[in-house]
Amino acid sequence: MIETQIYAARRILVVGAHAFDAEVIAGPMAFVAAAGGAEVTFLHLTMGEQGHRCLAPALYAEQKRGEAGEAAALLGARWRGLDLPDAFLPDDEATALRVCDVIRELRPEVVVTHWKGSWHKDHRAACELTKNGVFYAALPTLERALPAHSPGLLLFGENWEDDEGFEPQHLVDVTPGFAPWRAAAEKYELARGLSSFPYMDYYASLYRLRGCLRGSTYAQAFMTMSHSWNAGAGLFMPPVGSGAQR
Ligand SMILES: [Zn+2]
């Protein structure tokens, strides 16, 4: 069961396109995992610095760095950024290798990122960069500063901008994480009414809706890669438990 696998992980990495994305696709889950002893890291590929109507991008990036720090602390997580440009997140090999290096450094058992079906180009890029970063991280013949590492589980979280083809395949109980998530998310001006989109109403309702179906007060939904991806990701692992050996 995905829920058991997530909460058994000792290290979890959540990759978001903009600061605040990681917190909504996996924030409540992150709190529960961290409270159980896991090391959870949010990787904000960009700070989302183009998203303020009045503040210049450099000033808003500085504000969001502060907000990201306060939010991560409330969720028991750490955060880091790659300082890539908002709205121009490069979907290229060099950036995927930077994600690979973070994965090799942190060695997460679970990686979470955006679902591919997004109208936002940075979100689509973040999904591709993470998939390719996981692939490169696992390649033992790819020489980087640190040795290869293969996360056991790659998940896609739920984000209002990534709803094309998203199916709530796996529902994870995040009930204890809801109140801390609300406090963390509200550290961001974005959540307090900067945008026309009612973020807090949307996500609070969404987690409750998923909880109704999960049989818990609150839940988060995730998708996984295909069976062939999961089998393929294990190609670089020692051949244990194959059908041929039984
Ligand atoms: Zn975003």
Image (tube, grey):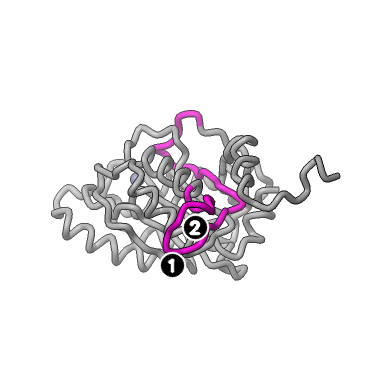
Q: Quadrant of residue 124?
A: top left
Q: Earlier in the sequence, mark 1 or mark 2?
A: 2
- What residue lies at 50% left-to-right and 29% top-to-bottom? 165
Give the residue pinned by disc 2. 13
Q: Which residues are magenta?
A: 136-165
In the rendered structure, does residue 147 fall within the stretch colored magenta?
yes
Of the residues shown, which amino acid type is indicated by label 1?
Answer: Arg
Image coordinates for residue 237, horizontal then vertical, percent: 64, 51
The image quadrant where one finds ligand 1 is: top left
- What residue lies at 53% left-to-right and 47% top-to-bottom? 207
229 and 153: which is toward the camera: 229
Image coordinates for residue 229, horizontal then vertical, percent: 59, 38
- What residue lies at 40% left-to-right and 57% top-to-bottom? 43
Q: Which mark is residue 143?
A: none
Magenta segment, prevailing SS (helix, strand or loop): loop
Give the residue pinned by disc 1. 78
Q: Where 197 sits versus 137, above or below? A: above
Q: Quadrant of residue 63?
A: bottom left
In the rendered structure, does residue 92 fall within the stretch colored magenta?
no
- What residue lies at 55% left-to-right and 47% top-to-bottom? 154
